[in-house]
Amino acid sequence: MSSRKAPGLDGITAQILRKAWPIIGHEITRLFERCIIEATFPVSWKEAELVIIPKPGKEDLASPKPFRPISLLPVLGKALETLIIQDLAEETDLDAHRQQHGFVSGRSTTTAISELYEWTNENRCRHVLGTFLDITGAFDNVRWSPVLSRLQKKGSTLRTLRIVQSYLQERTVNLNLEGRTYRRYLERGCPQGSQLGPTLWRVAMTAVGDIALESTAKVIIYSDDIAVLVGAARPPTALTRIEEYLDGLLDWARTNGLQFSPGKSQLMSIKGGLKPNYSVGFGSQPDSARITASENVKYLGVTLDPRQSYLDHVLSLKEKNKDMFMRLRRMTSANWGMGRNAARTVYAAVFLPRITYAAEIWWKACNLKKSIKLLGSMQRDPLLAITSCYRTASTNCLSAVAGVLPLDLEIQNTVLRGKLRKMEITQDVYETELVRILNTWQDRYEQSDKGEWTKKMVPDVGRRYVLPLCLDHYTSQMLTGHGDFLAQLHRFKLVNSPNCKCTIGGAETVAHVLLRCKRTEKQRAKLIKTLNEEGEGWPPRDGAFLKTQRTYEALRKFANDSLRNREDR
């Protein structure tokens, strides 16, 4: 059990137990054995501290619905729950219910979505309609008696059945609010935050798989998300079949104390190109609420569309993440605020995981020109934070200076790394594909009509990709040509003249400062000396400063010594 998990009311953490185990381990083991033999779950381990956290993306917090209740339970109780789960796995056939993808080892949201499209594409029916159902407060409201009945039906032994029953009885929850403690007894629900709760929910959901289905229909379940797929030659036939199946689901929900939310449920034509001007009744009764079809649906965090282009998903990613790095940009500027290393960490640990979630499903959208453009615009603020470049630098320059793959190529690389991790491809195949990705980046970089100076400083993006460099505000100016140079400032009408005040004269560009300016002659001499020692001549060839770590550090020192005080002129 993770040592980072919050403890229950007793304050005992997993870390404390690990340290004390050599002393108390034998007694705790005997205690667990006695609990299993006597089919008793101690009352003190059933007392939870309730913590309320807002659900992601919810803005209206005036009602209880936008909040998720989490039960902080004693660690010892969780350990005993784990033993019960092991017994249930040996005694029952939960894994035989292949419709469920949640809380199952080796299955996930991506396997659920993959199965949805695999079944649709293999189905010979002209039309396939998908209904995506929402259960209101699923985990909090499920009745215990049907769950126990399902366990018995699935082959659970009497002893295991009794300890699960003991686990569910006399459960209490404590909520501390504004200095007062409120205590309640629980009569239903799977405790969110427990070990056993997800397994009990899986047990409840097995009954969904038992509802009769025709060969032209399919049910896919992830946790409490239910997708019903129905194929037919004609849309009216598919709609009728959906309504008939929903009748069975409504019976299941009533038995288990649950309710569906027709308003939050979704309907879409997955195959056949049917325009969304239709609806389906939530059941076959005349007064049933109706689910209206839409052009796309959000299922398990991925926006699905009938064309399987996933362009709508990319658009939703842009909308969802537009504020994240804007907030980061408010915390940093070109030469102050959050450091470049911190920005790179946020990019890798927060931004990329949010963008690349379920990328193995939708990554082919990265082949669309519109998607490439959208993803590039999403990546721009993160790259500015990583490089400390001025906003006038093109995205083409920013990715090269940062040594970061363009976002569409990064997504492809993430998918390949996932396949390598799952041993679906070999290391040789991955390396071959990575070379292809880098070549694509190089071609795109060279063909761009922007960033000509950067192409001289960083001609080989593949080299930059593998070379760890420390960036700063002044070196980034030298690499991009966008900075406190009079010629640049004159373009924006910030100074009266573009010309340098040195004896050579002429426009003060980045090339002038680096190669000719008399005012930087002393700093340049040190730079030339280092280049010569590394086998490079002067004027430098394209890419000379990335030849070794030492040549780059020499450029970095030149940039800082030459430019540090120029913005104060």
Image (cartoon, grey):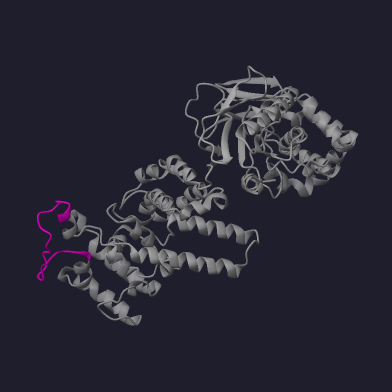
* Magenta-drawn segment: 490-510
Observer able to see residue 70? no
Q: Position of residue 421 (x, y in %)?
A: 62, 59
Horizontally, residue 169 falls left or right of residue 260, namely: right
Horizontally, residue 49 falls left or right of residue 60, namely: right
Q: How many marks?
A: 0
Horizontally, residue 553 falls left or right of residue 213, namely: left
Q: Which of the pair 253/378 is nearer the observer?
A: 253
The picture quadrant where one finds residue 75 is top right
- The outermost residue toward the front is 233
Q: Is residue 505 magenta?
A: yes
Observer able to see residue 442? yes
Horizontally, residue 17 falls left or right of residue 130, namely: right
Q: Which of the pair 415/18 is nearer the observer?
A: 415
Mainly helix, strand or loop, the magenta region? loop
The picture quadrant where one finds residue 425 is bottom right
The correct choice, above or below, for 71 with respect to 558 in the image is above
Q: Position of residue 412 (x, y in %)?
A: 51, 57
Image quarter hosting the N terminus: top right
Q: Is residue 423 magenta?
A: no
Q: Residue at x 43, y 59 (%)?
A: 404
Q: Which of the pair 501/213 is nearer the observer?
A: 213
Q: Residue at x 24, y 71 (%)?
A: 523
The correct choice, above or below, for 343 with respect to 535 in the image is above
